[in-house]
Amino acid sequence: LERNFLPHWHDRTLDEIDTIEVTERLREIEAAAKVSSHTGKGYYAANRALAILRKMYNWANANGYATRSPITSGMSRGNEREEHSSRKRDFTDDEIKRICAACDNLPAPAAAAVRMLMLTGQRTGVIGGMRHSEIDRAEMVWTIPADTIGRAKNKLEHKVPMTDAMMSLIDGLQI
């Protein structure tokens, strides 16, 4: 908000800002981000800015600071389908080698966590919250409970198959 919107609208009330002004500001954010982005796509930045502005307006409307929102449904930047698919990529063999080499300079728990991130594909919060009680050594399965805050985004139990390499990392930690 401070970087993308307040410098442009600082002397106005929330109800004074119109939809066209939001659209124009998003175009400016997108254009500026295209220049500095390694992907050449500025709509990531514009859509994130829009999400923050939408959240602020929702809160302001709910708490009586605004009576309307200039943000319309469907308002976004760029190609929605391309945006969601283009963010996924695989590490190259060279990148994996460099990450593994960098792990050698980390404390043991951090190095094990980074390696577990690569081996499991799980998020950092999920790996950081792993408990020995969640691991079934006989079945070689790690069960992430559905009720753990910040670890099961869909609120469903999740089973992650474990490999010998993952078990070695866990066994090598002195906890």
Image (cartoon, grey):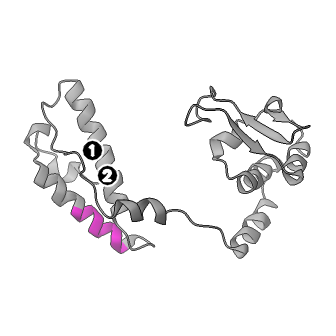
**Residue in front for this viewpoint, 89 or 99:** 89
What kind of element bears circle 1?
Answer: helix
Judged left or right of residue 102, residue 148 is: left
Seen at 57% across and 66% down, the residue is: 89
Q: Using residue 38 as the reference point, say whether residue 123 is left or right of it.
A: right
At 92% from the left and 37% from the top, the residue drawn is 138
Q: Which of 111 and 141 is in front in this view?
A: 141
Residue nearest the viewer, comparing 32 with 40: 40
Name the residue that disc number 2 marks: 49
**Residue 146 occupies which quadrant of the picture?**
top right
Q: What element carries label 2?
A: helix
Which residues, given as a range, are shown in magenta? Answer: 27-35
Residue 131 x %, y %: 78, 32
Q: Is 29 in the magenta? A: yes
Question: Residues at badges 1 and 2 in contact (C-beta under 8 Å)?
Answer: yes
- What x and y, as percent, mark residue 128? 70, 40
> Where residue 171 appears, x then y in whole percent?
91, 43
Mark 1 is on which residue type? Leu
Where does the image place residue 67, in percent across and percent down from the top left?
12, 30
Q: How far apart are marks 1 and 2 (CA)?
A: 6 Å
Name the quadrant of the C terminus.
top right
